[in-house]
Amino acid sequence: MASKKAANGTLKLSPILDLNEATSLHGKLMSMRGNNITIDASHVERLGVQCAQVLIAGARAWQADKKTYTVEKSSDAFAKTMQLIGIDTDHLVAKET
């Protein structure tokens, strides 16, 4: 399961982000909405398309809220899967306005 560190606005992603994790990931992101957030993807071993969609939707929501949403410390598996499904991880970073 993904866990969050509320004190510093960091959401540490779980190693396995599959269909079973998508609903939990969505809930955790929504509980942090309204704050700047950093996504720690350093321990991701497997990323399913459903969780990738949740992460992209989160980036768009944060951008609409004019908050920062940064993905950092991406594991090789995270970066390679995002590239394989055609997502440039630069699009997961909402710009501060």
Image (tube, helix red, strand yellow):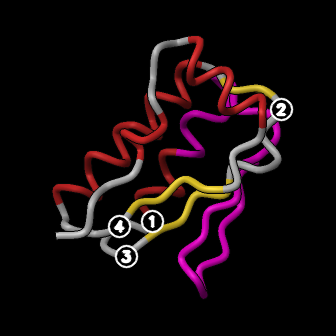
Circle 1: element type? helix
Specify the amino acid type for callout 2: Glu
How crowded pointer 4 is (Cα within 10 Å; few <14, some 14-19, many 20+) is rated as some
Whether residues under marks 3 and 2 lie with C-beta atoms below 8 angstroms apart, the answer is: no
Circle 2: element type? loop
| Residue wearing tag 4 | 68
How crowded pointer 2 is (Cα within 10 Å; few <14, some 14-19, many 20+) is rated as some
Q: Residue at x 66, y 67 (%)?
A: 4
The residue stretch that appears in magenta = 1-25
Res. 45 mark: 2
| Residue wearing tag 3 | 35
The residues tagged by marks 2 and 4 sit, at their Cα atoms, a distance apart of 25 Å
Q: Is residue 62 left or right of residue 13?
A: left
The residue mark sitting in front, 4 or 3, is: 4
Specify the amino acid type for callout 4: Thr
Q: Is residue 80 above or below residue 21?
A: above
| Residue wearing tag 1 | 31
The residues tagged by marks 3 and 2 sit, at their Cα atoms, a distance apart of 27 Å
